[in-house]
Image (cartoon, rainbow, N blue to C red):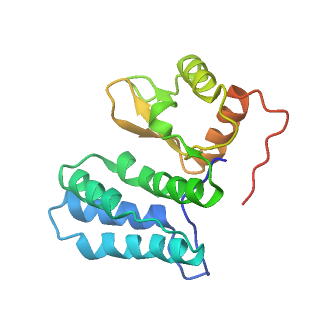
């Protein structure tokens, strides 16, 4: 399963990725971003509660806050939507969570490294019956998070399907 970040719940709503970009820009400019981050955390808590999960993302949000303060970059910020949703989905579906940063690779220029990714991902998925891998991001050779363009979770889905030699890849919105 390759989830995206939560999208709009109603027409006037804001996608989580856009909320993360806004929050990160506030952090980057030295403004207090805590209320913006709390709104994002509340959004995830609403999902967790709705699914009746016993799951806390508090530690994840503390790490995100630290990394925002240290200016980890817009790609890092945007990727957290998929990352957090992946954790929620893995818990809900009782599947193994695999961080995309461990198996999706980009070169030093931010270009997708298909050969390295396919090899690593195929090996990582060997013997794994069910897994959740967040879409949209991976990491560069220097360890920095790198994202695909918007809609990158769809790209990640096809990469994962290839790596596990899936007979069928379905993309649901």
Relative to residue 160, is residue 44 depicted above or below? below
Residue 163 lies, with reference to residue 68, above or below; the image says above
Q: How many marks?
A: 0
State the image quarter where residue 28 is shown: bottom left
Q: Is residue 105 left or right of residue 8?
A: left
Check the picture and name the quadrant holding the C terminus. Answer: bottom right
169 relative to 59, above or below = above
Residue 137 pos. (x, y %): 49, 41
Percent across and percent down for residue 50 are 58, 77
Residue 102: where, in percent of width, then height? 46, 32
Considering only vertical position in the picture, is 8 above or below 135? below
Q: From the top left corner, tell me how far across and down residue 69 is, in percent.
A: 18, 55
Using the rendered view, name the quadrant where residue 96 is placed: top right
* Residue plotted at (46% across, 65% down): 55
Residue at 27% x, 54% y: name it: 63
| Residue in the foreground of this view, choosing between 108 and 115 | 115
Q: Is residue 35 toward the left or the right of residue 105 in the image?
A: left
Judging depth in this view, the residue of 138 and 121 nearest the camera is 121
Q: Depth check: 95 or 101 in front?
A: 95
21 relative position to 17: left or right: left
Q: Residue furthest right?
A: 167
Looking at the image, which residue is at 50% across and 77% down?
A: 46
Q: Residue at x 24, y 71 (%)?
A: 34
């Amino acid at each position: 399963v390759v989830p995206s970040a939560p999208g709009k719940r109603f027409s006037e709503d804001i996608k989580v990725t856009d909320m993360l970009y806004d929050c990160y820009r506030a952090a980057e400019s030295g403004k207090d971003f805590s209320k913006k981050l709390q709104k994002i955390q509340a959004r995830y808590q609403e999902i967790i509660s709705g699914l009746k999960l016993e799951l806390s993302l508090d530690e994840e949000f503390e790490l995100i806050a630290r990394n925002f303060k240290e200016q980890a970059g817009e790609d890092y910020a945007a990727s957290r939507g998929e990352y957090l949703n992946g954790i929620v989905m893995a818990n809900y579906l009782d599947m193994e969570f695999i961080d995309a940063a461990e198996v999706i690779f980009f070169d030093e220029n931010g270009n997708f490294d298909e050969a390295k990714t396919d090899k690593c991902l195929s090996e990582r998925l060997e013997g794994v019956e069910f897994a959740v891998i967040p879409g949209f991001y991976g990491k560069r050779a220097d360890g920095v998070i790198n994202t695909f363009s918007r809609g990158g979770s769809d790209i990640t889905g096809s990469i994962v399907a290839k790596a596990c030699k899936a007979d069928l890849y379905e993309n649901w919105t």
